Image (cartoon, rainbow, N blue to C red):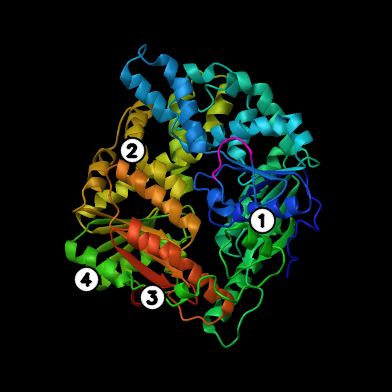
Amino acid sequence: MYPLFNPNKTALTPFLFFTGKGGVGKTSTACATAVSLADQGKKVLLVSTDPASNLQDVLGVELTNDPLAIPSVNNLFACNIDPEASAKAYREKVVGPYRGKLPDAVLSTMEEQLSGACTVEIAAFDEFSHLLSDEDVLNQYDHVLFDTAPTGHTLRLLQLPTAWTGFLEESTHGASCLGPLSGLGEKKELYAKAVESLSNPEKTTLILVSRPDVSSLVEANRASSELKDIGIKNQLLIINGLLQTHRPDDSVSTAFSERQRRALKETPEALKQVVTFSLPFVSYSLTGVDNLRHLFSSYTMTVFEDDSLSKETIYLPGLNKVIDDFSSKNIRVIFTMGKGGVGKTSIASAMAVGLSEKGHRVHLTTTDPAAHLAYTFEGGALRDNLTISSINPEIEVKKYQQEVLLAAGEGLDEEGIAYLKEDLESPCTEEIALFRAFADVVEKSENEIVVIDTAPTGHTLLLLDSTEAYHKEMSRSTGNVPESVKKLLPRLRNPKETGVVIVTLAEATPVLEAARLQEVLKRAQIDPKWWVINQSLYATDTTDAVLKGRAVSEIEWIKKVKEELAPQCAVIPWLHEEKIGYDSLKEFIDA
């Protein structure tokens, strides 16, 4: 279908940036590419900016901010930049000089403004700008690989002249991510050089990584188009995890293959124009240098790495236990959280159906930008006690942007307005806008159970963490705080009223990100009640050697969730087809 990606057979530029939706395999693809290039005799530097990076486990050495020679691979050097630590240091650099000089409330507001996703991303960009603009790096290494790429929003923000003036320090316009650049004034030239290197097709290639599923292809298309607009046009696409063959006598194997191929037929037209390669779905986990080397050699491992694991049985209940628990305790607000693509919408929908079947009045709503709740219930009749609604992110964001522009735009010059508009394009703005709509829906839980399908992890983290910030934000920008917003956080913190379900897959990145999400929730005094492991191959009876191998590799992550992370845990097997309609959703409950 697509040629296999092989760094030995593809001419690659000195800088390689890997991007794609969370969990598509960016880090493992970047690591395998780095090892392959180093094995060819090229001198390679691998830079990780993923806070959940398992680069150290993969390469078997402790990594720091400084490049370190990897003992098991000649010519390979690696460093692990923690963008959250960089953001923290950066935040302190900006706020520190004012300690003892300004009131605590002002310092606290400054810290809140510098706690968004944008600050973390700009801090990461700050770190790798040095590498991009330093000629010595190019002289020292043949290739520098970054396992994440900056987003279009950050790059556009950096190109606006207003970003480099004193505007930010003076402005109180009330937008969501005010101030992320306020401590970087002296770095204008460095960033201009970095953006120039990114846009130079002889120096940089953007490698879009996607799974063969619709949501990650849509995300790859969005990133491709956004970064092309900034001038980063040298792009290639890798479809990662494509099942090469399947066993016709194995229903899981056949359905798995067919689902992947159906998704690929829906590849967005613009993305089809990008040079495309594939990487195989493999039976082993992509950790350890030996396994990384197998990836480009079409090697099929059919003997399980640890046979004792393949015989291990882990008992976990199904989704029906989660529903029974919430029903018996009369929980009024239930929300599903987790990384994008783990199946939050399906799980939220199935729980709403299950509670409705038990006779409760239920309202199901989504703040997921994918907004495919209506699609999930397509073609089936609902029971009288179940209603559904969808919060449209586009409408809510526009409403919020208009309010801020009206309240804060007056008196700004053209450049100031341009900056404010770009600031209002940030993910933080979307979270705040959705938060307001979300609060209105939770109000309804006084009369019925509300099941909420929240936005993906990155959004959701800030959605909750910034509750208090939002509270103040609203006071400043519009002069009033809706009652629903004031009441929301205490309700979310009340375990007798609210139940949080963390949804994950039994893989490294989704589990590690979900663990971080849980930590943030706990800091906000919200304790998740259940974890649901979705789409588990381990919970199927597949005999396909490749899928079976992957099922065995899930055991480590299922045990970690069950024994270390989850207060209570349920599992749902990989299901043959997408469940559409009320009756089909019931299959999740009994699976």
Q: Which residue is mark 2?
A: 467
Label 1 or label 4, whichever comes before in sequence order: 1
Q: Which residues are magenta?
A: 62-68
Q: Earlier in the sequence, mark 2 or mark 3?
A: 3
Give the Cα separation between the discs numbered 2 and 3: 42 Å
Residue 210 versus residue 407: which sits nearer the camera? 210
Q: Quadrant of the C terminus?
A: bottom left
Q: Which mark is residue 359?
A: 4
Q: Main secondary structure of the magenta part?
A: loop
Label 3 neighbour load within 10 Å: few <14, some 14-19, many 20+:
few
- Tell me, yes or no, if residue 165 can be seen here: yes
Q: Earlier in the sequence, mark 4 or mark 2?
A: 4
Q: Amino acid at mark 3?
A: Thr
Pick whichever of labels 4 and 3 is earlier in the sequence: 3
Query: Disc 3 marks which residue?
Result: 313
Q: Is residue 63 on the magenta stretch? A: yes
Q: Single out the mark in the foreground, 4 or 3.
A: 3
Viewer-side label of 4, 2: 2
Tell me which amino acid carries mark 2.
Answer: Thr
The amino acid type of the residue labelled 4 equals: Gly
Measured as percent of width and height from the top left, residue 364 is found at 33, 60
Q: Is residue 62 left or right of residue 443?
A: right
Q: Is residue 124 left or right of residue 393?
A: right
| Whether label 2 touches label 1, CB < 8 Å | no
